[in-house]
Amino acid sequence: MQYVKGVGPRLAEVLAAKDIRTVDDLLHYLPFRYEDRLNPRSVAELRAGEMATVIAEVRNSGLFRTRRMPIFQLTVGQGRTRLKCIWFNAAYLHDRFQAGQMVALYGKVEEDRDGELQIVQPQFEILGDINANEEGGAGAAEKEAEKKAAASLEIGRIVPIYESAGQGKLTPRWFRRMIRWTLDNLNPDLPDPIPAAVRAHLSLASLREALWKVHWPDAGESFTDLQSSRTAAHIRMIFDELFFIELGLELKRREQKAQTGIAFQLNDGVREAIKKILPFHPTAAQKRVLKEIATDMQTSHPMRRLLQGDVGSGKTIVAFQAAIIAIENGYQVALMAPTEILAQQHYFSARQILEQAGYRIVLLTGSLEQDRKREVRRHIAQGNAQLVIGTHALIQDRVEFENLGLVVVDEQHRFGVMQRLKLMKKSDDARVVTGLRPVLPGEDARRSTEAEPDVLVMTATPIPRTLALTLYGDLDVSVLDELPPGRTPVITRSLLDERAPEVWDFVRKQIAGGHQAYVVYPVIEENEERELKAAQQMHRQLREKIFPNLHVGLLHGRLDAGEKEHVMREFQQGKIEILVATTVIEVGVDVPNATVMVVEHADRFGLAQLHQLRGRIGRGAAKSYCVLMRGSKVSEEGERRLDAMVRSNDGFQLAELDLELRGPGEFFGTKQAGIPSFRVANIIRDRQLLEAAKREAAFVISGPNAEISKVEIDRALREMRSRWALSYGLVEVG
Ligand code: ADP
Ligand code: MG
């Protein structure tokens, strides 16, 4: 940013904090709202209850000290009409206004106690006063000229309002001027990176036009469309952003398809082996999905498939079956889980199901003793181990396989596209293990001529279709949309804390009936220490006071691996009857005999997370119960979440609602979820544009043809690559 007029290193830093590093970023810093200063409301027409922009002259102002706080009052007028504005706790405003100044005010019009109109805490701008808070550096004459030009940007038009930056140091007005200057100096022959045919398909504005109008809308533009980002200019900007993401994903997908993979044989012997391990009849969905996977595995291209299935839909056995196909063909399989508990659990069931059938399985996690680790690695390297189960440590350390044929990544929901890419960047071994490459789409990644292993990614997060398109656009998708038979839906209740005694009674009864229970306590990262203490305290109280005759265990993330394993095993074997746990049990834990889950402070969890948690019960034939405990003070949103949980057992429905309530970032567990963070698009609002972007990306890559030239395609791909490089951190910005 430093080569833009007036931006020194200090400002560059402030801007970088807003993700503005290039001129392009600056141009994509869109107004979050607009003010109609072309037709501002006259003071006389104002009505209580409306949001309004008013331009008026300062009449007087003053600071009043009440007992509780200083109040700043400003009176503005137009002719004979007057309007009062007040700000609480705003002593800092006392010398900002002078009689005679023109000011623009924006806020909600209200009636005060005497029935007079006022605006409380309006946003304001003193028009024509451009010295305040800004970094200058220009000469005096130039400054004067600038003042005039700047003033014309502030009245008599629809004015863009930008979020300030650097604790108010960079005002909306600063951005207005800076962006205007940049636009004025934009190369007039700026080629549009979106091919003409694509623009024509969707009647999109050109880049140049969109950039101008999104910052400086025409006088005739619909104000509602502006505020809701629905003008032609906005739509172009949004599409633009989505299109280049989709283009990258589409390209990656094609490249992956074009690589050499392993063509596994699926003869009668293999079929027999797959069937033999089944401890139950597979559901129709399981059969269908296995067929999709097996078909991929038989082709000579590497499989890149996402298996989506709600909690308890039975993904594990499908993964085991896929593993057998690879193993029977003489290849090794790696199964990666996000937590040690889950890895151990997979190991546990793999031994029950696969070891009995004669397959050789090893567990490799970070916590193994060094000696044991070395030994396990040797087994892997020599090809003795056929199925390697581990945490992601598998990809962090240099694990060498003799001939890896299939990689299964379980509970991938925490790892989105971007994170997958980043993970890969860390080490080349990751590339080997996951088969996903640390390269930008379109770059030549081939380093060896060896066949790429197949990759199956499994997730329980019911990702709405359109989101799956962005997050996993480079993968094919299979869905397990059926639960195994004999499950009765979990009965869910939301209760006030004061009813805890009844709840504990109920738990006691279930245990007397031979079942087990979870008590889940939220431990949120920010307050980890304190909350962990609370969970431990809870455990002590339950063990000593409430269930003195029962076995109450404790499981949390800070236990070392051995302890975790021990606790899990005891719970699995029924020696522990009540397991007090933090969300470490959220993913994948499978103890069908547990029929009750009590969630403390349930309102603190997100919906997707609550659903995951609840998925730990209702896994056997017995009726299961989920009790969501909450205090009397719950936010409205928390209330809605609990309500939704009580009403619905459907992961997809809950996910959609969660998305709406919290937005995609939170839904996927904040930024680290690897959802690309969008500058202008909003994947919920802009679903249709996302679909269109996907379609058009495929169209572009299938070219050139009569509609689209090679030059245009190359330009689009170049643009895509530079955006992927900059935005997704694959290339450090110098
Ligand atoms: P998830 O999809 O959440 O990983 P799991 O693979 O852990 O689900 O399966 C949940 C439970 O359902 C396990 O106890 C598993 O043995 C059982 N299960 C899976 N498929 C079937 C089936 N077709 N019939 C009966 N039980 C099944
Ligand atoms: Mg699972």
Image: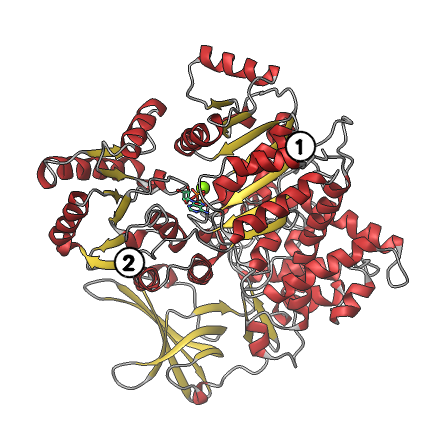
Above or below: residue 8 compared with residue 48: above
Task: Give the left or right position of residue 562, taking residue 259 as reference.
Answer: left
Above or below: residue 640 compared with residue 711: below
Q: Is residue 101 visible?
A: no
Q: How far apart are labels 1 and 2 at the CA level?
A: 42 Å
Task: Give the left or right position of residue 666, taking residue 395 as reference.
Answer: left
In the picture of the structure, the residue carrying the numbered disc 1 is: 453
* Colour approach in the figure: secondary structure
Which residue is more in the foreground, 285 or 582?
285
Q: Secondary structure at mark 1?
A: loop
Q: Secondary structure at mark 2?
A: strand
Task: Give the left or right position of residue 55, taking residue 538 as reference.
Answer: right
Above or below: residue 223 compared with residue 609: below
Q: Quadrant of the C terminus?
A: top right
The residue sitting at 45% across, 89% down in the picture is: 45
Q: Position of residue 308 (x, y in %)?
A: 53, 49
Q: Position of residue 638 (x, y in %)?
A: 31, 59
**How many numbered marks appear?**
2
At label 2, the amino acid type is Ile
* Mark 2 crowd level (few <14, some 14–19, many ≥20, 10 Å Cα): some
Which residue is more in the foreground, 452 or 242?
452
Q: Is residue 596 visible?
A: yes
Which residue is more in the foreground, 82 or 181?
181
The residue sitting at 37% across, 43% down in the picture is: 586
Q: Position of residue 645 (x, y in %)?
A: 34, 59
In the picture of the structure, the residue carrying the numbered disc 2 is: 491
**Quarter of the view holding residue 636:** bottom left
Which residue is more in the foreground, 299 or 451?
299
**Residue 150, labelled with which disc?**
none
Q: Quadrant of ligand 1?
A: top left
At label 1, the amino acid type is Pro
